[in-house]
Image (cartoon, helix red, strand yellow):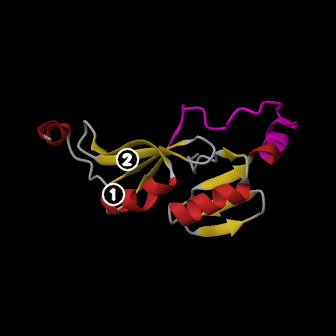
């Protein structure tokens, strides 16, 4: 068995597709109407139809799908350029900052309230190397 990818539920598939395609610059690999798969394996699914598929009924809750318990992680070779392009279009959690492990990241919410992180690629090294930072 191998893990493939998470599939966040979204309220408005067209709005979310546009957000991930235009704001984050992801490329659509397949669009099945209520399910969109982007290159690299990230996917989104229209929430109500996925509720019917998984639980055989639509859940009555109108709460946002993003609940602050999941972080969608993306990488960009130039995190400062990504921040400059994305920040004006999102609700920021925080601007670019260096994390304890040395990586620079910024975080924001997508249209459904899912927390999203964009970080610079990080070469994983030994614990000794990380402690030096």
Residue in the image at 20% along x and 42% along y: 126
Horizontal relation, residue 10 to residue 48: left or right: left
Q: Position of residue 94 (x, y in %)?
A: 38, 41
Q: Secondary structure at mark 1?
A: helix
The answer to which quarter of the image holds residue 17 is: bottom right
Residue in the image at 85% along x and 42% along y: 52
Magenta segment: 50-71
Horizontal relation, residue 11 to residue 7: left or right: right
Q: Is residue 92 magenta?
A: no
Which SS does the magenta portion mostly show?
loop
Mark 1 packing: few (<14 Cα in 10 Å), some, or many (20+)?
A: some
Horizontal relation, residue 99 to residue 20: left or right: left
47 and 6: which is toward the camera: 47
Which image quarter is the C terminus in?
A: top left
Residue at mark 1: 79
The label shown at residue 106 is 2
């Amino acid at each position: 068995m191998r893990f493939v990818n998470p599939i966040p539920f979204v309220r408005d598939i067209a709005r979310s597709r546009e957000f991930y395609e235009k704001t984050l610059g992801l490329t659509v690999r397949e669009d099945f109407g209520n399910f969109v798969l982007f290159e690299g394996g990230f996917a989104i699914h229209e929430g109500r139809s996925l509720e019917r598929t998984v639980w055989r009924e639509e859940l009555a809750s109108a709460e946002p799908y993003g609940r602050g318990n999941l972080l969608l992680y993306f990488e960009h070779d130039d995190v400062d350029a990504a921040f400059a392009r994305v920040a004006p279009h999102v609700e920021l959690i925080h601007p670019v900052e260096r994390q304890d492990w040395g990586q620079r990241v910024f975080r924001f919410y997508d249209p459904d309230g899912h927390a999203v992180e964009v970080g610079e690629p990080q070469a994983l090294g030994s614990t000794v190397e990380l402690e030096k930072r």
